[in-house]
Image: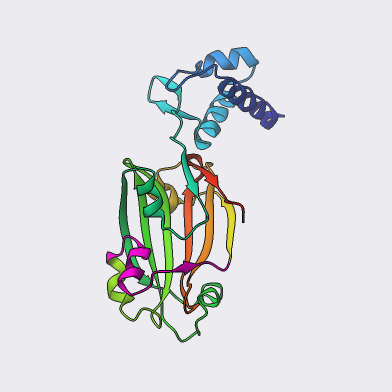
């Protein structure tokens, strides 16, 4: 029963937000006001507010109350095509910054090794980059690359900002992908810290490979983690 009351408060407040009754940075009624309105203990309202903060709807100011969080700008992202994320953002006139988070050798992982089409005795390196648009972190790109394909990746990896640019330096120019997988997940503590996102804001995760279109060799296996509330996603018809 107590949980149902909290859910009712959450649903009512979300409905108010959706209907446009609150604008960005507008203040919500106090815990005491809503407790009186619903005839419930103050802790029920507080729990509802905390859940809405975790969902990315609200933010709080110490001693002042809760306020409607401004909406993230929605960036149109084409999930298909052979151009890189950097090129797509540049073409859309966004100010993109990339932070290389490091390059490290990974332990054997059957799924990753299978997607890279390499043997267990090969060395695979993980290269992580944080994507920042207009000062806001919005995506985490993780590339897995085999040393048998790029012999210097152990040394080059920590400096790479764009994998496509790196491939061009290595003589590759035409790319394709065999398949992609998408899923939704909630952020881990590390992802929340990197992406500065709320606990219950879903992440959109795209996993795919990148293949040299000429020789059909697998160049990398990629996992891209997007803040779901920062993008609208476009999938072109085949």
Which residue is drawn at the image coordinates 41% and 58% (left, top)?
Answer: 84
Q: Does the segment drawn in magenta span residue 196?
A: no
The colour style of the image is: rainbow
Q: Nearer the viewer, residue 177 or 108?
A: 177
Residue 106 image offset from top left, x and y in percent: 42, 73
- Residue 113 on image: x %, y %: 51, 77
Quarter of the picture holding the C terminus: bottom right
Task: Identify the residue at horizontal 58%, vertical 65% (top origin).
Answer: 179
**Which part of the image, by quadrant, shows the N terminus?**
top right
Tell me if residue 101 comes above or below residue 233 in the rendering: below
Note whether 41 is above or below 163 in the view shown. above
Labels in figure, total: 0
Camera-nearest residue between 136 and 220:
220
Residue 136 against residue 185 in the figure, above or below: above
Relative to 170, say whether 225 is above or below: above
Residue 182 location, x and y as percent?
58, 56
- Please state the horizontal and vertical placement of residue 93, each as a whole percent of the image: 35, 42
Magenta stretch in the rendered image? 159-178
Please say whether residue 162 is one of the residues in the magenta stretch: yes
In which quadrant of the rendered view does residue 181 lie?
bottom right
| Residue at x 53% of width, y 64% of height | 208
């Amino acid at each position: 029963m107590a949980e149902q009351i909290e859910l009712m408060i959450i649903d009512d407040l979300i409905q108010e937000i959706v209907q446009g009754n609150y604008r960005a940075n507008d203040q919500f009624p106090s815990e005491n006001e809503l407790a009186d309105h619903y005839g419930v203990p103050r802790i029920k309202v507080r729990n509802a507010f905390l859940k809405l903060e975790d969902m990315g709807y609200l933010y709080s100011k110490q001693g002042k109350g809760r306020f409607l969080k401004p909406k993230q700008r929605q960036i149109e992202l084409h999930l298909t095509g052979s151009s890189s994320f950097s090129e797509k953002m540049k073409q859309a006139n966004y100010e993109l910054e990339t932070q290389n988070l490091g390059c490290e050798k990974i332990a054997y992982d059957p799924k990753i090794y299978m997607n890279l089409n390499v043997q267990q005795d090969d060395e695979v390196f993980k290269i992580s980059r944080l994507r920042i648009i207009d000062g806001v972190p919005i995506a985490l790109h993780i590339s897995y690359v085999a040393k048998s394909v790029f012999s210097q990746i152990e040394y080059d990896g920590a400096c790479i900002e764009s994998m496509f640019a790196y491939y061009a330096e290595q003589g590759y120019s035409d790319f394709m992908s065999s398949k992609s997988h998408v899923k939704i997940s909630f952020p881990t503590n590390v992802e929340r810290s990197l992406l500065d996102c709320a606990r219950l804001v879903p992440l959109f995760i795209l996993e795919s490979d990148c293949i040299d279109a000429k020789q059909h060799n697998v160049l990398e296996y990629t996992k891209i983690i997007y803040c779901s509330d920062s993008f609208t996603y476009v999938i072109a018809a085949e």
